[in-house]
């Protein structure tokens, strides 16, 4: 008899505790979750997006800005102007209905990108990477006909390329293979270098100065 009462009391206690837990839980605000479109794999800039390259995940609504897509159909067939990494949320500002070219980094009024061949020996043994700044020395091939030495100072390297693949990010200048540098120039510099072919040899000097503190 005593054992039966203990079982009944245990059942009542369990039900009571469950009820209290439910009441406590129902008083908490629930987190609203929404769909977010992500890239399932890397999508290169300038590509038209296919459905197999996309996926949906659930995220808290408060963590997703309005410009991120929530419907896969909004991205299918669109063209991306930036490279998308696997798992990256899709920003509607990066997409267009027609191919509109790539969006280059750090654009500015009057800026021009120009890619030149560069023998690794001309870089004086330094490692170069996107973001480095260099001085370009244009040395006349024929001193009697060409103009004097020309110097273009503080030119920023936008990318280091190996000629057959995508940007490598840096270049081992002791490598015997020829490389290419994509340079960030103004209009006059781009025009001058373009017209210098055959008249000048281009040598490069990497700037090795400490960055100044803007404060």
Image: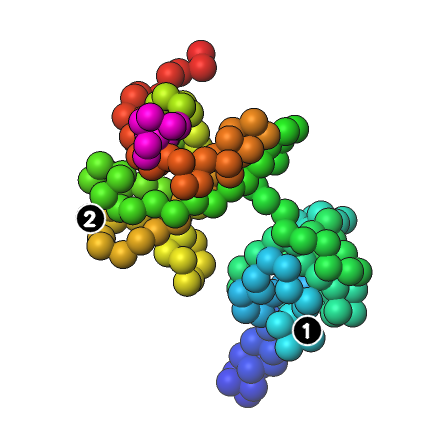
Q: Quadrant of the C terminus?
A: top left
Question: Picture quarter containing residue 168?
Answer: bottom left
The residue shown at (40%, 52%) is 161
Residue toward you, 175 or 55: 175
Disc 2, SS: loop
Q: Which residue is mark 2?
A: 174
Residue toward you, 126 or 141: 141
Residue 146 position, x and y percent, is 39, 28
Please rate how many residues cluster around mark 1, counting C-alpha atoms within 10 Å: few if below 14, some from 14 to 19, many from 20: some
Q: Can residue 78 be seen here?
A: yes
Q: Quadrant of the N terminus?
A: bottom right
> Which color scheme is applied?
rainbow
Disc 1, SS: loop
Residue toward you, 148 or 40: 148
Please report the bounds of the magenta region as a residue range: 136-146
The residue shown at (27%, 38%) is 123
Horizontal side, residue 207 vs residue 87: left or right: left
Q: Which residue is mark 1?
A: 50
Indicate which disc residue 214 carries: none
Mark 2–mark 1 Cα distance, whole angstroms, equals 41 Å
Horizontal side, residue 57 vs residue 181: left or right: right
The residue shown at (73%, 59%) is 99
Q: Is residue 137 inside the magenta stretch?
A: yes
Please rate how many residues cluster around mark 2, counting C-alpha atoms within 10 Å: few if below 14, some from 14 to 19, many from 20: some
The residue shown at (68%, 67%) is 48
Residue 190 position, x and y percent, is 53, 34
Question: Picture quarter containing residue 152?
Answer: top left
Q: Which callout, 2 or 1, points to the residue nearer the camera?
A: 2
Horizontal side, residue 48 vs residue 164: left or right: right
Q: Is residue 39 inside the magenta stretch?
A: no
């Amino acid at each position: 008899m005593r054992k039966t009462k203990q079982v009944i009391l245990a059942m009542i206690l369990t039900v009571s505790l469950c009820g209290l837990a439910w009441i406590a839980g129902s008083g908490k605000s629930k987190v609203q979750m929404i769909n977010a479109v992500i890239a399932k794999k890397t999508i290169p800039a300038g590509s038209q997006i296919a459905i197999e390259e996309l996926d949906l995940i659930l995220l808290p609504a408060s963590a997703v800005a309005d410009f991120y897509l929530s419907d896969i159909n909004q991205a299918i067939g669109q063209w991306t102007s930036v490279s998308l990494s696997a798992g990256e949320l899709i920003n509607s500002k990066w997409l267009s209905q027609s191919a509109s070219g790539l969006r280059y980094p750090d654009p500015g009024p009057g800026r021009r990108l120009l890619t030149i061949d560069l023998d690794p020996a001309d870089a004086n043994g330094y490692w170069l990477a996107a973001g480095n700044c260099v001085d370009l020395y244009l040395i006349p091939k024929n001193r009697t006909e060409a103009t004097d030495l020309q110097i273009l100072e503080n030119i920023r390297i936008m990318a280091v390329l190996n000629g057959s693949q995508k940007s490598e990010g840096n270049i081992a200048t002791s490598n015997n293979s020829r490389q290419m540098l994509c340079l960030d120039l103004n209009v006059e510099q781009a025009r001058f270098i373009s017209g210098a072919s055959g008249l000048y040899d281009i040598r490069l000097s990497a700037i090795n100065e400490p960055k100044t503190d803007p404060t």
